[in-house]
Amino acid sequence: MSGGARGLWWITLLTTLLVFIPLTVVLLHRLWSAAAKIQRYALEARRAVEGIVSNTADVAALGETVRAGSRMIDVAGGVAEKLDGVADVVEKRAGG
């Protein structure tokens, strides 16, 4: 190998060792840090979603409450009609 080629080889080798390898390490560290942050954010989001699910689990029970209330209104209407009938009978017997 000639002296010029050997010099160029050493310059390229030193440039790689002093510039490109440290740059690669820095970029890989940044990538790892970003991935770790994403993982932490995903964990926080999962915890939040689990909280929302547990807090809204009783919403289905509200539907059953509304249905029961509707049935109670229907029954109350029937009771009101019967009480009106009883009131009419009592009023007639009382002489009114």
Image: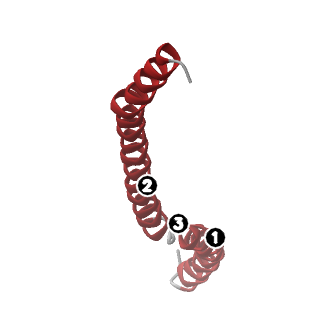
The structure residue drawn at horizontal position 35% and vertical position 36%, both measured from the top left corner, is 22
Q: Position of residue 70 (x, y in %)?
A: 62, 68
Q: Tag 1's secondary structure?
A: helix
Three-letter amino acid code at the position of disc 2:
Gln
| Nearer to the camera, 7 or 95 | 7
Mark nearer the N terminus (3 vs 2): 2
Q: Position of residue 61 (x, y in %)?
A: 55, 73
For this view, does 84 lie left or right of residue 52? Answer: right
How far apart, in angstroms, are the residues tagged by discs 1 and 3?
Answer: 13 Å
Q: Tag 2's secondary structure?
A: helix
The structure residue drawn at horizontal position 61% and vertical position 73%, both measured from the top left corner, is 64
Say few, some or many: other residues with alpha carbon within 10 Å of mark 1 (under 14 / 14 to 19 / 20 or more): few
Front: mark 1 or 2: 2
Three-letter amino acid code at the position of disc 1:
Arg
The structure residue drawn at horizontal position 33% and vertical position 30%, both measured from the top left corner, is 18
Q: Position of residue 48 (x, y in %)?
A: 40, 59
Q: Residue at label 2? A: 39
Mark nearer the N terminus (1 vs 3): 3
Residue 10 placement: quadrant: top left
| Nearer to the camera, 31 or 41 | 31
Residue 45 placement: quadrant: bottom left
Three-letter amino acid code at the position of disc 3:
Val
Mark nearer the N terminus (1 vs 2): 2
Q: Residue at label 3? A: 59
How far apart, in angstroms, are the residues tagged by discs 1 and 2?
Answer: 43 Å
Q: Residue at label 1? A: 67
Callout 1 touching callout 3 (CB < 8 Å): no
